[in-house]
Image (cartoon, rainbow, N blue to C red):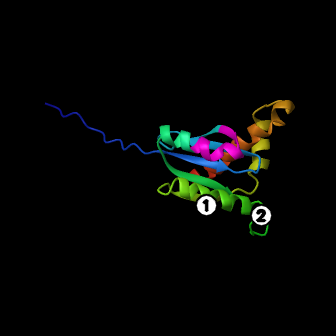
Amino acid sequence: MSKNPTFNLTIVGRILAIDYGRKRTGLAVTDPLRISAGPLETVATKDLLQWLKTYLGKETVDEVVIGHPRQMNGEDSESMRYIRQFVTLFRKAFPNMPLYEADERFTSVLAHKAMIDGGMKKKQRQDKAVVDKLAACIILEDWLARN
């Protein structure tokens, strides 16, 4: 009698990436097995915390990665002061959720290049909401590659 092999597939939660902006925030997420990343949504930043509460309440997410904008010399960009304020609010709202920072230099440039390479028309490429969620996707893809 042959034995059937059993597989233990450990289910892990997704990783969510945030490309925080003062007006709009791009979001991306991995698949449940954390193999690939895909753009998720662009949300008005003023609504971001509530959007996250709703999303994290219905989806299994184990980690969050937020873009850390830096200047070419490695110093924080001016927009980091807004991101730090959001990080404080995030940690209060989700005290048990790991939140990591990832270098986001050139993500918007790479998002534009990806849109051009993907054949998007100029009008579509001017949609900043698309750029924001693609930038979040690039942050997440880079995070997956490094970790």
Q: Residue at x 75, y 69 (%)?
A: 75
Cα separation, mark 1 vs mark 2, equals: 18 Å
- 100 relative to 27, above or below: below
Q: Secondary structure at mark 2?
A: loop
Q: Which residues are magenta?
A: 41-52
In the picture, the disc for residue 77 is 2
Magenta-drawn stretch contains 118: no
Q: Give the residue pinned by disc 1.
A: 88
Q: Residue at x 73, y 63 (%)?
A: 81
| Residue 146 visible here | no
Q: Nearer the viewer, residue 112 or 16?
A: 16
| Nearest to N terminus: mark 1 or mark 2 | 2
- 118 relative to 16, above or below: above
* Residue 40, position as x, y percentages in the image: 63, 37
Q: Is residue 4 left or right of residue 129?
A: left
Disc 2 residue type (three-letter)? Ser
Q: Residue at x 75, y 38 (%)?
A: 129
Quadrant for the N terminus in the image: top left
Q: Residue at x 72, y 59 (%)?
A: 82
Q: Is residue 84 left or right of residue 79?
A: left
Q: Quadrant of residue 102?
A: bottom right
